[in-house]
Each structure stands twice: as structure tokens, then as C-alpha cells.
Image (cartoon, helix red, strand yellow):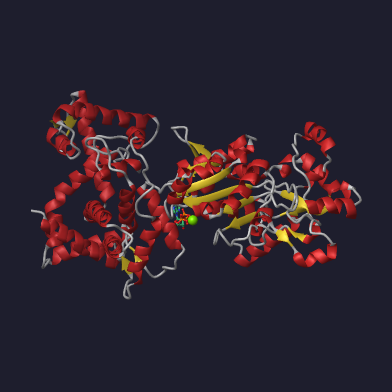
Amino acid sequence: MMSILEKIDAHLNNHRMESWEGTFRDYLPLVMENPSLAQRSHSRIYNMVKSAGVRVDDDEKEHYAFFEEELFGIDDPLARVVEYFKAAAMGSDVGRRILLLYGPPSSGKSQLVILLKRRLEEYSRTPEGAIYAMTECPQQGDPLLLLPHALRQEFQQETGIFVEGDLCPQCALNLREKYNGDIYAVPVRRLFFSEKERVGIGTFVPSDPKSQDIAELVGSIDLSAIGDYGSESDPRAYRFDGELNVANRGLMEFIEMLKADERFLYVLLTLAQEKNIKTGRFPLIYADECVISHTNETEFNEFMADKKSEALHDRMITIRVPYNLKVSQEIRIYEKLLRQMSLQDIHIAPHALRVAAIFSVLSRLEAPQINGLTLVKKMKLYDGEDVEGFRQKDVKMIQEQTEREGMDGISPRFIINRISASLIKADTTSVTPIDVLRAIKEGIDNQGQFKHAERERYNDLIADARREYDEIARNDVQKAFFVSFDQEALTLLDNYLDNVEAYLDQAKLTDPITGEEIPADEKLMRSIEEKIQVPDYGKDSFRNEIFRKVAMAHRHGDKFDYTTHEKLKSAIEKQLFEERRDTIKLTITSRSPDTEQLRKLNQVIDNLVEHQGYNTESANELLKYVSSLLAREK
Ligand SMILES: Nc1ncnc2c1ncn2[C@@H]1O[C@H](COP(=O)(O)OP(=O)(O)OP(=O)(O)O)[C@@H](O)[C@H]1O
Ligand SMILES: [Mg+2]
């Protein structure tokens, strides 16, 4: 294994090796050989995203690996963002519009732009993402801008590379005075994007709209240099250091765009539309960069309602970025955010993040409009689980009935703050699902941000999340009661399948011990089937379906085990639990357990620790909790 020091050395070496300096004469053959060096900003970003891999799902939706480890559960808006880059890369007019993301707080908008910026820095260090610039250009201009207009068409025919735009004033002056018009002599270097060094990646944050200087965007006159050069319009007396100059060839992030003064927006539009940075000082400063901005929904709506800014509206591509609506993905968001905190000594009990995710996803869902569909069922469906009465194929129709789902509700940030709050408590070494729900409830009740009606709704949803947890907790304990749950489930499944086979063939089974012929055990089959509400009149079709699935798995060389079929799995589990219910209940609710019961309890705790991710403390908590649940049952 390479030590981290060696890795850093190798990294630095690599970068040194990759740097390149030469003249425009040296650069020309490079770019003719490899036209991707000359691709423009949108195209470079699109290729970067695409090169990480694209998966197309059954609904022909595209999923990009580029985002996979960072952004969870918002594939639709992400696909739209990529579409924008794709259209722009292909030269469509879309590239001449500004991308504006809007959505509720903490929905991942900033994270998305940060990801693009960081990866673009790395990409410019790879062969595929390599990019070159005129060494002396204050805004790292494209060397091909040196090509005289008269030759550009022929150059395109020869190489396929389309060149547009003009040298910046500084480069034009250099070419004239320093190189006497000899374009070949102009120095060129490989460029490495770096936000920190202000190369190719810019960020703009509006401050006070009245006093903020437009120079922050477009650069400014260097008053001290005017004396040296005698004129204000000498480019040497100008600092090309606005964020738009900085972001030339790359990416510009415009934070809270709609908070900015209109003057700033118009400069942006000229840039997008005409690819020019407007300064008043120089007529044309060509720039090629991609502008991504973001804002919250309130400001977005105000902006869209404002007639004065109509001209701006259709020069933007707006993409709504709602919250994630899948519980499993929400858990990943929390895991990611918690990783950024140092929690080595704290045990987060199983399902603690899940209950928080259940609550926050519920808070974001719109009430279903269909008979029989509850909010909780909808939540499960969205996360890929089939529920009583509904299947995955219904999801699309359900979503079509929503208006602004995911635009309201609890943010991941809120949840993480609440989890941290429960971690901070002095003596905490582990956090259970109930701790988390309690911390969330405290936050809802005590923080002024929620209105009365909202608080009530959220409290109901906390109760829903808790009921879900009750089910999960009970399940964990029941499983832990078996020495080998999977083995026993498998045995029961085999038994069920043998009986189904005999039933369907109208054959008899052979008793393994006595060798006698016995009829299929209808009572056992029905007992299992009733656990998942298979009605008596529906038993034949259910048994046929199961048998078909078994045959199919067999034909494909797969094993059909009890986890293959969601519903059957749940039936088998319930059947097993029912058979043991009384022992389980007696054992854990007993106030003075006998030796045998104590032995069993210890075994259950061991099982929970060994197989289900608990530690001794959280396993004990779980048993206490489930025992109080069972004691309440009649
Ligand atoms: N869908 C998601 N996938 C992964 N992380 C997410 C997701 N949504 C939010 N986050 C995380 O939550 C935190 C807040 O998100 P971010 O800062 O990107 O929100 P935002 O949309 O820019 O909000 P604001 O409007 O408040 O600026 C970030 O750490 C981000 O990584
Ligand atoms: Mg943000």
C-alpha cells in the first residue's frame, strides 16, 4: 500500500509532468490532433459529466454516475441540468441562457454547483479535460482566438474546430506591440482550473445591491496605472479581475442571483446572449463560460411575477430542485452529513436515521388524492416498495396528481441539527431512534420558525414515524429470538413450496419419517397466506403465481429463497413470529425472568449485537422498548 505521503508526492509529480508551455506554433499541431482541447465551456462540462457514466432505466430516464456519490434522490432535476449542458454543447441556443436553480432551503442546489466546480478543477488535470490558454492573457483566453478571421472558415473545414470571438484588449495590444503581429510567437500554456487561484472558476455573492460595485463582476480601471500609460482606455490600465473574467473558459456560480441589483443581471445576460463582458470601457471582451445561479423559491416567484424583468425571464433556463422524496436516499444524505462531523465514539443505533428520514419525507409529501392510499403507503411506494393495493407502476400516476411536491417540508439540515442536539447531551454514547424522534419533536415545538398548524401536522407525522418504528423494532427483536432466523425461514418456505406443489399437482406428499402418503397441508398453507391477506378465493392464483416464480428462477439458474418474493417473505416471517409469539412475549415482558428466560434474553442481545448492528446498550434499550409495546397489547 502506498502511504498517503507517497500518494501526495505522486500527485504533485503528475501535475508537474502534465504542465506544458510553448508557443502558438507549438500548440497548433496539438489541438489539430486533438480537437477536444478546444472545446468550449458547456461542452467540456457536459463531457465531464457524461464520461463518469450514464445509466438509462426502464422508463428511459437517465441517471448520471457523476452525481451518484454526492447527491441522492434528485435524479430528475439532475437529468434536466445535464440536458441543459447537452443542448448547449451541441450548439443550441440554450447555451445562450443562464441556468437558474430554485428550490427550498438545503435541497442541494449549492452542493450541485460545488460538485461541478470541484470536479471541473480535477477534470482540467486529466488528458480528456485538458485545456490551454494564452500565457499572458489576463482572462486565460483561448489561443485559437489568435487565428485571423479570414482563415477561420478554412481552419474549421480542415479540423472541424469552430472558432468564434476576438482577443481581449490586452492580448490584442500584446500581439501588436510585443509580437509585431506574429501570432506564432505568442506564448501558450496548459491551464489548470482552480477556484482558489481564481482561474476558470468564479463565484459571485450579492451584497448590498446599492453599494456593490459592478467591478466585482467585470473588472475595473487601475487608477494607479493610468499615469504610466497615459490613457484610461489603455488595457494595461485595466484590471481584468472581475469574477466573469476569472470564470472565462469555465464555470461561474452566481449565488442568490435574484438578490443582486438589476445592473448585474443585465451584465450576465449580455454575457450569456452575446458572449461578451460589457464594461463600458472596451466595446468587446469575448468570454466563453457557463453561468449557474441559484435562488430560493420566494424570490423566484417574485421575480417571475415582476413585469419589469420579463426580458430576463426568457433568457433563463429555470430548473426546480425539490427535496428528495425517498427514505433510503434521505438516509444516505444524513450519513454523508454525519461523516463530516467527528462521531467516532458515538453509536448511532440501527434505524435511528431511518425514523428521521421517514419523518422528513412524510413532511414533504402532498396528501394523496386516491382512495386507499395513505401518506405512509405513498412514502413506501416512492421508495420502491409495493404496498397493499398499489404497485410501482402506479407511482407515475400518483406523482402526476401532485402540484409542488418536495418544495415544502423539513430540510436535511434541520434533521442533522436535531441529531447533533441529541448527541451533544453530556452523557450520550449512543443515540436510539426514539432519541432522534424526541429531539425532532423538541425542535418542532420550541423553534419559532413553525406556525401552529404546521406544528400540529408535524407532530402527527412524528407519531406516524413512530408507528413505523414500532413495527421495525418488533421485527428486529422477533428475529433475534431465532437461533438462525434465515435457516428457519428457509425451512418453512421449503415446506410451504412442497405443499403448494402437491396441491397444484393434486398429488400427495410423502411423510419423511414414516414414508406414508399424506395430503397437502391446507391449514399450514392458509395460515401463511392469510398473513398477507390472500383471500380464500384467491389462493389458487396466488399459489400458481408463486409456483411460476419458482420455476422461472430455477430455469434461470437462480435460487428462489424466501427473500425473492416480497410478499411471501413477509408472510413467512409473520408465520414464524406467530408460532413463537407467546414465548417471545413471555420472555421479554417478564418482570422476574427465570434462568431459562435470562439465558434466552442474553442470547437475543448477542444476536442483535452480532447480526443486526446494535451494541449492548442499544440492544437493551430496544428490548425495553419492545417489551413496553407488547405489554400494552392485550
Ligand atoms: N439530495 C441531496 N443529496 C445529497 N446531499 C444533499 C441533498 N440535499 C441536501 N443535501 C445536503 O444538505 C446540505 C445543504 O444543501 P445545500 O447547501 O446544497 O442546499 P441549498 O439548496 O443550496 O440551500 P439554500 O437555498 O439554503 O442555499 C448540503 O450539505 C448538501 O450536501
Ligand atoms: Mg445554497
Check the image and report above or below for 8 versus 395. below
* Residue 334 percent coordinates (x, y): 40, 57
Residue at x 45% of width, y 48% of height: 302
Depth check, front residue: 517 or 347: 347
In the picture, measured across the screen, residue 24 lies left or right of residue 242, that is: right
Residue at x 40% of width, y 48% of height: 324
Outermost residue on the top side: it is 506
* Residue 368 percent coordinates (x, y): 28, 39
Image quarter hosting the N terminus: bottom right
Depth check, front residue: 421 or 54: 421
In the picture, measured across the screen, residue 237 lies left or right of residue 3, that is: right
Check the image and report above or below for 19 versus 269. below
Asked if one can make out residue 192 in the rendered structure from this viewpoint, the answer is: yes
State which quadrant residue 158 falls in: top right
In the picture, measured across the screen, residue 601 lies left or right of residue 102, that is: left
Outermost residue on the bottom side: it is 426
Outermost residue on the left side: it is 634
Depth check, front residue: 628 or 383: 383
Asked if one can make out residue 490 in the rendered structure from this viewpoint, the answer is: no
Outermost residue on the right side: it is 180
